[in-house]
Image (tube, rainbow, N blue to C red):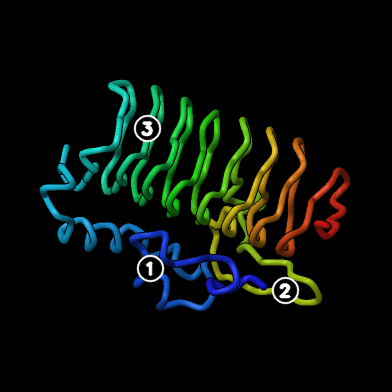
Amino acid sequence: MYTIKDLYDLDHTLAADYLRGFTYPWEALGGIKNMILALGTKLDPEQYAEVAPQVWVHRTATVAPTAYLGAPCIIGAGTEVRHGAFVRGSALVGENCVVGNSVELKNVILFDNVQTPHYNYVGDSILGYRSHMGAGSITSNVKSDKSLVVVHGQGENVETGLKKFGAMLGDFVEVGCNSVLNPGTVIGRESNIYPLSSVRGVVPERHIYKTGGVAVPKR
C-alpha cells in the first residue's frame, strides 16, 4: 500500500520518468537534486525563464518579491509562490501549486495542484496530486536520536537506510492544521488527517486518521 504505484498518478508531475525507476517513493529522495538539474536543462526557454542559475520558473507562475528560490528548483505553470516563502533548494514544484507565506521547502517533489499555503515545513518528502497541508502542519524529517528511519507498516517494518525522510503523501491527501507528520510517515490516497495529529507509520488509503491515532475507513 506504499509503493509509488499505490500512492501516485504519475501523469501529474515532471518527475514521472524519474519516479518510474523506483518501487518505493522514499528511494527517490537521494536523487532529487540531480533529477531537477537534468530536467532544467531540457525545459523550453519560451515557457520557463532561468531567473537565477539553476532556478527555472514558468512564465505563468507568480513569485512574490520577498520569496527566496534556492538552486536547483523548478516552479511550474500557474503556481503561486507567496511572500516570505523559502525554497531552500532541490524542490520540484508542479503546476497550479501554492507555496505560501513562511513555507519552507527542501528536497521535495510537489505534484501538480499541491497546496502548502501557510506556515508549513516540507522536507525530504513527496506530496501527491491535489494533496493539501493545513496551516501549521509540517513534515518532521529527522528522528530525535538521529537513527535511520523505518517505515512502520501494517504487520511489517521497512528499513529505508535514510537518516532524513519526512513524509509521503498520496494523491488527494488532506492534512489538518498544526499536525506533525513524523519521520517515515506514509499516507495513502484520499485519506484525511485530523487537525493537531501526531502521525506515525502508514495510514491506509481512503481512511480518516482521528484523535488518538485511530484510523477508520471512509464511508
Task: Tell me the SS state at disc 3.
Answer: strand
Amino acid, disc 1: Ala
Give the residue pinned by disc 1: 16
Amino acid, disc 3: Val
Residue drawn where x is 33% and y is 60% of the image: 14
Amino acid, disc 2: Asn
Locate residue 74, reporting x and y percent.
Answer: 29, 48
Residue drawn where x is 53% and y is 50% of the image: 130
Residue drawn where x is 53% and y is 71% of the image: 4
Q: Is residue 103 left or right of residue 83?
A: right
Q: Is residue 48 left or right of residue 208?
A: left
Give the residue pinned by disc 2: 157
Disc assigned to residue 214:
none
Locate residue 28, reporting x and y percent.
Answer: 44, 67
**Front-most of 204 and 53?**
204
Q: Quadrant of the N terminus?
A: bottom right
Residue at the far left: name it.
46
Look at the picture and state if 142 lies above or below 51: below
Is residue 174 in view? yes
Give the residue pinned by disc 3: 81
